[in-house]
């Protein structure tokens, strides 16, 4: 969140609604927690929490609404992966707006493993993906992108040919969010 005035107004509204006094330290904690998100996202989160919370929301409540529960995040990431496999394939290098996906595939052996997937195995792959995702989401760093078969083969043969990286999920996001995701 970048609009400090709107942030303070929203926090004061929650404070009055839940009869909770706010200190300068609490303002700073919530401000830092909401920093990675857009003003529009935060406004929706404030509204949702004001209407649905029984107690004054914690920063974790905001994060859960803004990012979704870990299970929801993993399921959304899986949908993105399946759509990308069908649309792009494994030959091109890809960069997801959710870098946790990169870590899961690094563990699996890279993006080209998708070439071996059969439709009847997808439900099992999904379960494995979601379990790994929930573990990998805790990592502090993730690969910047996933090299595809063409890039890997070119590098193995000693060719210094860089292929275009297909960006997945960056459509319609602000430039600031793309930069934060490594794009």
Image (tube, rainbow, N blue to C red):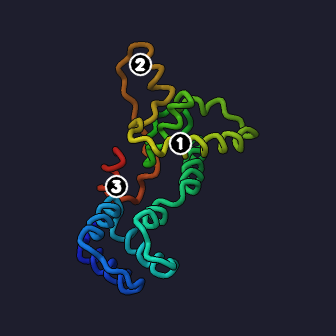
- Residue 117 point in image, percent of width and height: 67, 34
Q: Judge whether 48 appears above or below 90 on screen.
A: below
Label 2 Cα crowd, 10 Å radius (few <14 / some 14-19 / many 20+): few
Q: Judge whether 86 appears above or below 147 on screen.
A: below
**Considering the image in quadrants, where does the C terminus appear?**
top left
Label 1 Cα crowd, 10 Å radius (few <14 / some 14-19 / many 20+): some
Disc 2 or disc 1, which is closer to the eye? 1
**Considering the image in quadrants, where does the N terminus appear?**
bottom left
Q: Is residue 129 left or right of residue 49?
A: right
Q: Which residue is mark 1?
A: 135
- Assign a secondary structure to mark 3: helix
- Assign a secondary structure to mark 1: helix
Q: CA distance from mark 2 to mark 1?
A: 30 Å
Disc 1 or disc 3, which is closer to the eye? 1
Q: Which residue is mark 2?
A: 155
Q: Nearer the viewer, residue 102 or 65?
A: 65
Work out whether mark 1 precedes mark 3 in sequence or the reverse, and give the earlier one: 1
How many numbered badges does the structure rendering display? 3
Label 3 Cα crowd, 10 Å radius (few <14 / some 14-19 / many 20+): some
- Residue 41 point in image, percent of width and height: 40, 68
Work out whether mark 2 precedes mark 1 in sequence or the reverse, and give the earlier one: 1
Q: Which mark is residue 177?
A: 3
- Give the quarter of the image for residue 29: bottom left
Q: Judge whether 64 appears above or below 159 on screen.
A: below
Work out whether mark 2 precedes mark 3 in sequence or the reverse, and give the earlier one: 2
- Residue 177 point in image, percent of width and height: 34, 55
Q: CA distance from mark 1 to mark 3?
A: 23 Å
């Amino acid at each position: 969140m970048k609009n400090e005035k709107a942030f303070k107004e929203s926090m004061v509204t929650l404070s009055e609604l839940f009869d909770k006094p706010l200190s300068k330290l609490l303002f700073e904690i919530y401000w830092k927690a909401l920093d990675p998100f857009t003003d529009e996202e935060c406004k929706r989160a404030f509204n949702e929490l004001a209407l649905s919370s029984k107690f004054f929301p914690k920063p974790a409540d905001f994060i859960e609404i803004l990012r979704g529960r870990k299970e929801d995040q993993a399921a959304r990431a899986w949908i993105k992966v399946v759509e990308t496999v069908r649309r792009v394939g494994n030959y091109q290098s890809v960069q997801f707006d959710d870098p946790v996906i990169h870590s899961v595939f690094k563990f699996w052996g890279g993006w080209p493993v998708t070439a071996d997937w059969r439709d009847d195995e997808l439900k099992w792959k999904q379960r494995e993906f979601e379990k790994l995702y929930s573990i990998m989401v805790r990592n502090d760093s993730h690969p910047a992108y996933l090299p595809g078969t063409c890039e890997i083969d070119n590098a193995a043969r000693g060719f210094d040919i860089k292929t275009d990286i297909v960006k997945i999920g960056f459509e319609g996001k602000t430039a600031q969010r793309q930069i934060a995701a490594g794009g």
